[in-house]
Amino acid sequence: MSTPLDRLTDLCPPPAPVQPPVDWAGVEAALGTRLPQDYRQFTAAYDPGRLADFFWVHDPRHTSVHVRLAGPAADRIRAQMRSDHARGICPSPVDPELLLPCGGTDNGEVLFWIADPRAGPDAWQVAVNEARGPRWFVFDGGLTRFLVAVLSGTTEVPQFPKGLAADGVGFEPSRLDQWCPPLPEPSPPVDSAQIRAWARANGYDVPPRGRIGVAVRDAWERAHRD
């Protein structure tokens, strides 16, 4: 019976790995959590690099802060999620403390593991946050299964370009000292009072306090998007 990794390597064959193996005990100690088995298998099959000229998966071996699994970039993203959630601006679908960045796209979307249950990483789901926007997508499965579903065209993520895999997919390995995709810029803080005032001026019914509804936030984002 084929595994999700078997299907992924059929879709997107990797070259023979040349980078050193991962010190998983050290990585998991630094993160304070065990990691999914499918992710361990993914890093054994694929060096750091890019899938389908679009996805990059965080790797413990990479020297770039942008794509290293643990480091300042991941900490910055998590801090942004906590701030947004507390302000009611583009809040995550789960407690932001459960979000662990695991990858991203060239368009600026961020991929997260939903680390719940904490002690059962093989049951973690994958969440996608829109680049500089409010939309979230949650995939009921692990990272490798998610990549297979998107690259095979069986799952469409609203935040991703349509026909992403229409022209075929491939894997581009990177040199650890060269490849450095840009870190998405943090979303600027927005006063929720501004959103409420705009909503009332445009015919939306919003409460004076508490969480602002998703439909209102979406409408505000569309109205203020460049």
Image (cartoon, rainbow, N blue to C red):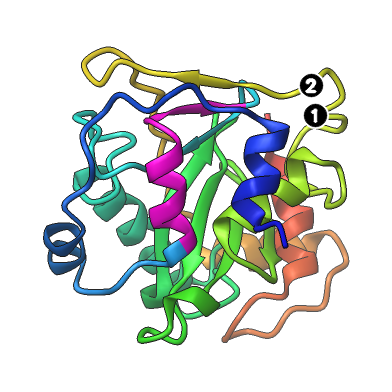
Q: Is residue 55 left or right of residue 2?
A: left
- Give the amino acid at mark 2: Gly
> Above or below — where is 141 with respect to 11?
below
Callouts 2 and 1 close, C-beta under 8 Å: yes
Residue 34: horizontal and vertical position, in percent?
29, 73
> Above or below — where is 87 with respect to 116?
above
Label 1 residue SS: loop
> Above or below — where is 176 with respect to 102?
above
Determine if the magenta segment contains residue 94: no
Residue 99: which quarter of the image? bottom left
Q: Residues within 10 Å of mark 1 (few under 14, many from 20)?
A: some
Q: Which mark is residue 165?
A: 1
- Give the amino acid at mark 1: Ala
Q: Assign the C terminus to one quadrant of the image.
A: top right
Residue 139 shows up from this direction: yes
Q: Nearer the viewer, residue 219 or 29?
A: 29
Tell me the residue at 22%/47% (across/down).
22
> Above or below — where is 118 with respect to 203?
below
Residue 15: horizontal and vertical position, in percent?
48, 21
| Numbered range of the magenta stretch | 38-51
Q: Residues within 10 Å of mark 2 (few under 14, many from 20)?
A: few
Residue 48: which quarter of the image? top left
Q: Which residue is mark 2?
A: 168
Residue 200: horizontal and vertical position, in percent?
77, 68
Label 2 residue SS: loop
Q: How many marks?
A: 2
